[in-house]
Amino acid sequence: NAGVMQNPRHLVRRRGQEARLRCSPMKGHSHVYWYRQLPEEGLKFMVYLQKENIIDESGMPKERFSAEFPKEGPSILRIQQVVRGDSAAYFCASSRGGREDEQYFGPGTRLTVT
Amino acid sequence: TQLLEQSPQFLSIQEGENLTVYCNSSSVFSSLQWYRQEPGEGPVLLVTVVTGGEVKKLKRLTFQFGDARKDSSLHITAAQPGDTGLYLCAGARGSGTYKYIFGTGTRLKVLA
């Protein structure tokens, strides 16, 4: 009865490197959402994906950030050329359907950029 | 603009006391969720409320959605140290919206 899985749990990158965060949704869920939680701030929506489709990426920074959810395998949030301001906890959530379905969160990936 | 304001931001109480946490907005939400988040972990869904005036109970926790669907409250009876955590409300706006808007949270500490 696995929940949403994210890896790695902790990721340290130097400025300019790439960060790849992975998310496997709950069994039976085909909708994935990524949120970012900055220190002392609330969670902010980044992107909503279904298999092979980006439905809404209105919360994603326009540069350096991308997300995918391939037909096979986990969803990936990719941050290129990381900067210190990217340091945050990144959470993935999944739901069975889309709209108005309850979202269940993973444990998060804590990214530290040095 | 913070659409969901939670109060209080911090709360420290003794075991056995009762408390209420509020989640307020000037906007109408089609549904509202309450989550609890512990340090180093992701938010865990506690409840979803969708109907104005709805009350849901989860053991010692009572959740209420305001009649106008703009606010919600979480009441904990006889708090226990295990209730310690960050309580987050999240609202979905409009029909079929998946973009949860999260409140800033209430950090609760229950002392034994």
Image (spheres, coloured by chain):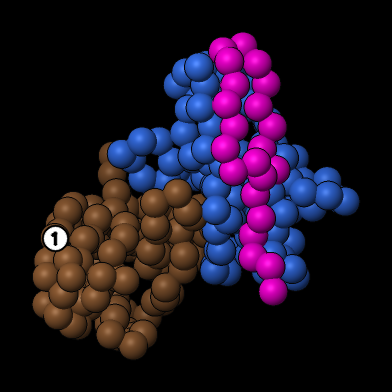
Question: Looking at the image, which residue sits at the far front?
Answer: B112
Image-based side of A88 in relation to B1, left or right:
right
Between A59 and A33, the one nearer to me in the picture: A33
* Residue A45 appears anywhere in the view: yes
Q: Residue at x 29, y 54 (%)?
A: B105
Between A86 and B13, the one nearer to me in the picture: B13
Image-based side of B70 in relation to A102, left or right:
left
* Amino acid identity at mark 1: Ser
In magenta stretch: residue A19:
yes
Q: Which x, y percent locates residue B75?
A: 21, 77
- Which chain's colour is blue? A
Callout 1: helix, strand or loop? Answer: strand
Q: Which x, y percent locates residue A79?
A: 64, 26
- Which chain's colour is brown? B
Quadrant where the C terminus of chain B is found in the figure: bottom left
Between A103 and B24, the one nearer to me in the picture: A103
In magenta stretch: residue B26:
no
The region drawn magenta spans A1-22
Which of the chains bears the disc numbered 1?
A: B
Image-based side of B93 in relation to A26, left or right:
left
Q: Which residue in the protein does label 1 denote?
A: B12
Specify the quadrant of the image occupied by residue B6.
bottom left
Specify the quadrant of the image occupied by residue B8.
bottom left
Q: Which x, y percent locates residue B72?
A: 26, 70
* Residue B64 appears anywhere in the view: no
Q: Residue at x 59, y 32 (%)?
A: A11
